[in-house]
Image: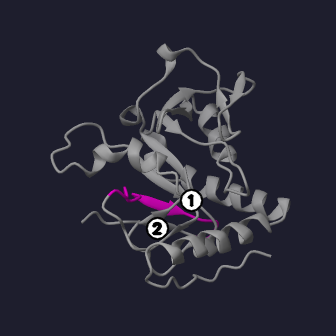
Amino acid sequence: MINNTSIPLPSSPSGERNGLRQFLLAQRRALSVAERHAAALAVAQRLAMEPGFTEAAAIAGYWACHGELDPAPLLERAWTEDKIVYLPVLAGDTLLFAPYQPDDPLRRNRFNIPEPEVSPADLRLPSDMDWVLTPLIAFDATGTRLGMGGGFYDRSFAFLLEPGWQGHHPQLLGLGYAFQRVEALIRQSWDVPLDAAVTENALYLFAKS
């Protein structure tokens, strides 16, 4: 059964982060298939009702692994509304995004995660996305996100931290379970905050400082 309790986070920026990561990973993996599916459907229903979903033409999802909140139900809704769905593709230590339709060919990257098998000409930049659905381990009330520790999303969307950025602003939406909401995370200088986070229970919008 899903535990909806927000988990307190001690203030140590490194060791405690790793401890929290392992604790929440274990909780996430312990969810049953039925619990994961129910949460994914609830998140999809909640986000599909948002005006931003109607306006978004390019939606970046991800291939859910290790119990991550699965964006597939929302991506299926996006296809029915003729939106272009993208999945991340590793490009060195950053991400590019490849268009994806059901049954398109896939290949495994170095982390054994499926990626669309497309030509380089079909890849798009992070700044080309409208909505970016991001997996997470934890998030807090300020939109700070704790991921797996690889830094791929932070490096890829670092342009959003630039004070003078005048280009397109993709909306970063963290997808997770209610128990992944914690009291506080220490934000590092390279952490790109979320615009919103959504769980099976609620949508959280974060003010920009």
Q: Which sits in the foreground, 192 or 74?
A: 192
Q: Which residue is mark 1?
A: 136
Q: Is residue 196 shown in magenta?
A: yes
The numbered mark at residue 204 is 2
Q: In the displayed structure, would residue 3 be above or below residue 39?
A: below
**What x and y, as percent, mark residue 55?**
42, 40
Q: Nearer the viewer, residue 14 or 118?
A: 14
63 left or right, relative to 183: right
For marks 2 and 1, give the one nearer the viewer: 1
Residue at point 37% right, 44% down? Answer: 157
Residue 89's spot in the image, x, y percent? 55, 32
What residue lies at 59% left-to-right and 75% top-to-bottom? 20
Residue stretch in magenta: 190-201
For disc 2, the neighbor class at 10 Å (few under 14, some 14 to 19, many from 20) is some
Q: Main secondary structure of the magenta part?
A: loop
- Residue under the point 71% across and 39% down: 112
- When the figure is inspected, residue 189 is found, relative to residue 185, above or below; the finding is above
Residue type marked 1: Leu
The percent position of residue 63, horizontal first and vertical second, equals 66, 42
Q: Is residue 159 above or below residue 138?
A: above
